[in-house]
Every structure is written in C-alpha cells, then in structure tokens.
C-alpha cells in the first residue's frame, strides 16, 4: 500500500522532556490536506485501513490504541464490542477476547464501555471526581448512595463474602427509590451497582448467558494512583488525537473515553512541543489537528461497521468527513425506516458507500440482509459488489451463520 504523508511545509520540532517547559513560543507550521486525505488519516488512525492478523496480542493492541469499546445490549447480529474488533481484525477467536477480559484482566468494564486496564490511572481520576461530587450528576449519585447506605452495605458485604454475583443475588433494601423519567426509575439495586462502578468500588468480574457478575474492584483491579488533572488532560488529548487521526478540538472532546479530559491548554502544549500541529482541510472550517508524525495509507479494504463503531459514533464528524448522513433507526417505526433497524455502514476503501441491514437467525444459522442501501455516488461495478458480498460473507462466518440471504431485486442496486 502506498503511504500518503500529510502535505505541507513542516519541520519536525524537538519534543520537550517530560515536565520541562518549552524554551519559548514556536511558530506552528500549518499544512493543507484534501478531504480524501483527511478520511484516510481517520481510517488509518482507527486501524481500518488493513486487516491485521487476529490474535490475543492484536486484540490487546487494538483496544489499547482505540481507548475503548462501547457496550450496547443490542444483539441483532453480535454485540457491538465484538463487531468493532471484527471490522479491524476479521474472524478472531472470541476465546482470546474472553481470556484477555476475565483471565488476564487486561480490560475492564466502566460505565458503558470496555477500557484497557493500562488506562486505569486516567479513569481513576474520573472515579475520584464522582466521589468528590464534582458536577450536578455526581452530587446526585453520592447523595442517593448516601441515603441508601443500608443497600450499599448489603451489596458490598455480599460481594466481599461471595462475589462475583449477578444482579438477582441482591435484595432491594433501598430507603429512597431512584427517580428518573427514563427506564431506570425504581431499579434501585441495578442503579446502586451502576453507581458503585462509577465510584470505583465495584466492577464487573464476568459475564455468562447475557448476565453480568459483579465483584469488588479492590482485589480485581490493580491499585493505581489517579493521574493529576494536567497529566490526564495531556494524555487524553494526545490519545484522542491518535485515535481520530484528524479532528477539531470539539471533536476531540466528543471522543467517548477521553473527551471529558481533553483541554485546549493540553492541545496548545502538544503543538508547542511539536507533537501535534494544525492542518487545513480544503472546504472545511477548522482548525483541525493531527499528530506531527501522522500518516495514512491507501486502503483497498471493504468492511462493515457497527452503528456504534468508533469511526462513525460522532455522527456530525461522519457527515463532514464522509458525506453520509447516518442515523440509527432502532426507535423509528418500521414503515418509516430508510436504512434499517441495524444498518451497518459499508466502508469501501476511503469512503462510506452505503449500508447493509443484517439480521441473524441463530436457530436457522442464517444471516439475512433485510435492507441494502447504496449512496447516490457509490461505485456500482462488479468488483465493488463482490467486495460487499465478501464482507457480508465474512460477517456471517464470524457470527456462526451457515447461509446468507439477500433481498430480492438486489441486482437493481448495481
């Protein structure tokens, strides 16, 4: 694959030693790149430009680079975290992921995502902020947990003696119910466990048959010291930029695992030290930022992306870079859906060219393509069709399907 370097006058600047202030203000070189180059930077940063040999080692490296895998209960085809890895690694062994998760404890579940345990010092700062009641929601959590001290003691005591345990193992000993307009109203035991995870007291120690098994964080997770806020900002900003490839400050702040720590000050410091720099993307309002050693490759891959894939989870950024207006239609009435219930965007080379809406019939071993949609400017040649079919076939093999069924009249799309 040909490597495309970001164009523009740029001189590599020496990096300051950790903790050492830069000698003085530096002039930041600004490059100009095309929208296509920006897309390739994003795809490369998301590890989607080439297939990596699946193994426990590549699973670990992938998650550590991405920073997180979003958790979602929808299982129309497979869980989101499994699909995100499949899009990058192909047919990896689920046993390798389970071993990394529950045996090696290389990952841990926090709130609604899986994070590498190596990032625990960063997330420990988040836990400390909740314990300190920083912000209205954190104060509401600590107040409710405090008012239900009996339920908290019950949960912690059971876990200390018998954990890991499922949700059903605990009695609702709450004094004050959790009130909300959402579906968590009065689900007091579930909310207590969720809040104890946010506080860093409890973690998930296993999963079986769709159920989570909770355990005490102490003894399961390593003891770490939370990063200082300035260090957390620097780490998170650089990591977010590495995972996005090219982004505005606002887009970096929307990166799920890192965004809350990203600061303008950290980004400016990375610029001054020559670690990051500004770029202009033709036709777009910036400023955009890249790492100074950023590069991208021309990709000939075609794969499908989960609706919660890290590349496209920021819908505004997806529309700006790829020109696709993509929205999930899970809560849209069936007769009003355009792309489908679980429409998976098709990443073909450096473009999003359409969506495939698959549905897994596990009893019949059938992966059914319910809806297939191509963008107006998508290529419609035979090789593109074959590439899409191959991607769907590979998804079917990964999920254990023995057969793929396409909707009638599919040939009219080409």
Image (cartoon, rainbow, N blue to C red):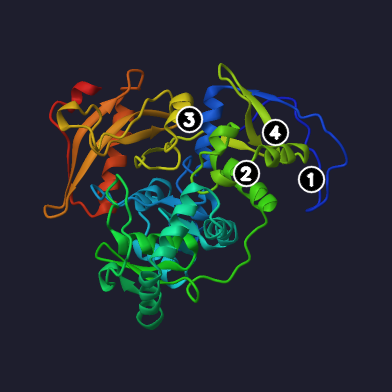
Q: Is residue 46 left or right of residue 166?
A: right
Dot 3 lies on which element? Answer: helix
User: Which residue in the protein does label 3 denote?
Assistant: 317
Q: Residues within 10 Å of mark 1 (few under 14, many from 20)?
A: some
Instruction: Find residue 249 and report its image quarter.
Output: top right
Q: Position of residue 352 (x, y in %)?
A: 39, 29
- Residue at the far top: name it: 283
Q: Is residue 2 something one can see in this rendering?
A: no
Of 276 and 352, the residue lying toward us? 276
Of 116 and 87, the residue lying toward us? 116
User: Which residue in the protein does label 1 denote?
Assistant: 15
Q: CA distance from mark 4 to mark 1?
A: 13 Å
User: Which residue in the protein does label 2 denote?
Assistant: 237
Dot 2 lies on which element? Answer: helix
Q: Is residue 384 something one can see in this rendering?
A: yes
Instruction: Find residue 355 and report its image quarter.
Output: top left
In this view, the mark in front (3 or 1) = 3
Q: Relative to 84, say whether 208 is above or below.
A: below
Which is nearer the N-term, disc 4 or disc 1? 1
Q: Residues within 10 Å of mark 2 (few under 14, many from 20)?
A: many
Which is nearer the N-term, disc 3 or disc 1? 1
Which is nearer the N-term, disc 4 or disc 2? 2
Of 42 and 176, the residue lying toward us? 176
- Residue at the far right: name it: 23
Q: Residues within 10 Å of mark 3 (few under 14, many from 20)?
A: some
Q: Is residue 305 left or right of residue 121?
A: left
Q: CA distance from mark 1 to mark 2?
A: 16 Å
Which is nearer the N-term, disc 2 or disc 3? 2
Which of the labelled discs sits on residue 277, or is there none? 4
Q: CA distance from mark 3 to mark 4?
A: 19 Å
């Amino acid at each position: 694959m040909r490597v495309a370097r970001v164009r523009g006058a740029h001189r590599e600047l020496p990096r300051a030693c950790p903790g050492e202030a830069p000698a003085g203000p530096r002039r930041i070189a600004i490059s100009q790149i095309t929208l296509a180059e920006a897309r390739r930077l994003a795809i490369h940063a998301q590890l989607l430009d080439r297939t990596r040999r699946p193994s426990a080692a590549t699973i670990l490296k992938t998650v550590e680079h991405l920073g997180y895998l979003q958790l979602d209960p929808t299982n129309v085809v497979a869980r989101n975290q499994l699909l995100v890895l499949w899009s990058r690694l192909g047919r990896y062994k689920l046993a390798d992921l389970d071993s990394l998760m529950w045996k090696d404890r290389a990952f841990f579940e926090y709130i609604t995502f899986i994070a590498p345990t190596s990032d625990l010092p960063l997330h420990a700062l988040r836990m400390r902020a909740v314990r300190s009641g920083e912000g209205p929601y954190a104060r509401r959590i600590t107040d409710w947990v405090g008012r239900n001290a009996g339920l908290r003691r019950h949960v912690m005591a059971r876990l200390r003696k018998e954990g890991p345990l499922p949700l059903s193992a605990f009695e609702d000993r709450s004094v004050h119910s959790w009130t909300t307009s959402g579906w968590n109203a009065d689900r007091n035991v579930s909310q207590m466990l969720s809040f104890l995870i946010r506080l860093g007291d409890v973690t998930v120690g296993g999963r079986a048959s769709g159920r989570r098994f909770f355990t005490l964080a102490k003894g399961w997770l390593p003891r770490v010291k939370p990063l200082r806020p300035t260090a957390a900002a620097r780490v998170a900003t650089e990591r977010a930029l590495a995972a996005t490839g090219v982004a505005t400050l606002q887009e970096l702040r929307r990166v799920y695992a890192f965004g809350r720590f990203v600061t303008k000050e950290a980004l400016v410091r990375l610029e001054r030290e020559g670690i990051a720099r500004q770029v202009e993307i033709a036709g777009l309002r910036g400023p955009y930022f890249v790492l100074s050693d950023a590069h991208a490759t021309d990709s000939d891959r075609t794969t499908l992306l989960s609706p919660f894939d890290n590349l496209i989870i920021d819908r505004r950024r997806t529309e700006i870079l790829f020109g696709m207006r993509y929205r999930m239609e899970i809560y849209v009435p069936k007769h009003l859906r355009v792309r489908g219930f679980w429409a998976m965007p098709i990443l073909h080379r450096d473009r999003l060219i359409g969506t495939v809406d698959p549905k897994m019939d596990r009893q019949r071993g059938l992966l059914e393509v319910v809806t297939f949609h191509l963008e107006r400017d998508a290529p419609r040649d035979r090789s593109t069709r074959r590439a899409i079919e191959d991607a769907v076939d590979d998804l079917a093999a990964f999920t254990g399907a023995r057969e793929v069924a396409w909707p009638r009249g599919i040939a009219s799309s080409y």
